[in-house]
Image: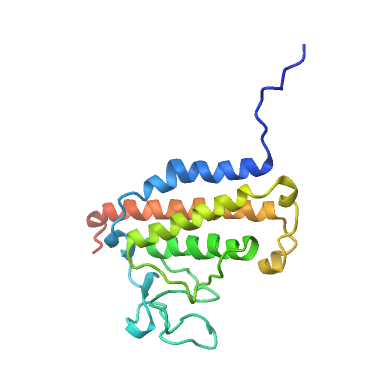
Amino acid sequence: MTADNSTRPTCTTRDILIEQLDWHWTNQLRPRLDGLTDDEYLWEPVADAWSVRPGADASDGGPGYLASPTAANPAAVNPAAPTTIDFAFPPPDPAPVTTIAWRMAHVIVGCLGARLANHFGGPAVDYGTFEYSLTAGGALAQLDEAYAAWIGALHSLDDAALSLPVGSTEGPWAEHSMGTLIAHINREVIHHGAEIALLRDLYAHRDALGAD
């Protein structure tokens, strides 16, 4: 007797990649962000944490904050931007602890936004010019928008497209496949989401940690 496979749903590699990320987003990551407050969003669990901050005109002097571009970081700050983000390239060793705001910005800009621009005709985006939100609600709206655009873009692909090289916008990884890039973004969103969830747990117990 042979098994009747006629009623089995078709499952493509694209579908598997989408389902992996979308299940995590729907059932774990996004629910864990419900109720995020501005205090949590900007909470710095240790001194010299990296975060998002008011723009260069505010000169707030936060850690890693560049009041003006330098030779090492020529695009680190857009003086006209209302907000900016702490970063350096190459990153310090050890890497700084970051706020929820910083982690969310990394997912919005570096993981999703840049790849939407590079591969799916999305608007150009970079760390130096993006208008980061200083409120949790604003950042959640940016994250939701970026995620919806990313998942929508993935649905436009077929398995043949997953085998094509990603091209020069991915620098030294230009010959890697689109499927490999999508798997990488899945890892990035999942693991940064877990870091954000942990920061929420630490914030909830910050008095026991002796943190302000």
Quadrant occupied by the N terminus: top right
Asked where in the image residue 181 lies, by quadrant, the reply is bottom right
Q: In the rendered image, is residue 98 in sight?
A: no
Q: In the rendered image, is residue 101 in sight?
A: yes
Left or right side of 175 for 69 = left
Q: Which residue occupies 68% across, 51% down?
A: 179
Q: Which residue occupies 75% across, 51% down?
A: 163
Q: Nearer the viewer, residue 185 or 203?
A: 185
Could you say where residue 204 lies in the image, as x and y percent from the top left? Answer: 27, 52
Give the residue furthest to the right. Answer: 1
Could you say where residue 36 lies in the image, as x and y percent from the top left? Answer: 31, 54
Quadrant occupied by the C terminus: bottom left
Could you say where residue 51 lies in the image, as x and y percent from the top left? Answer: 38, 69
Q: Which residue occupies 52% across, 44% down?
A: 22
Q: Nearer the viewer, residue 7 or 62?
A: 7
Asked where in the image residue 28 lies, by quadrant, the reply is top left
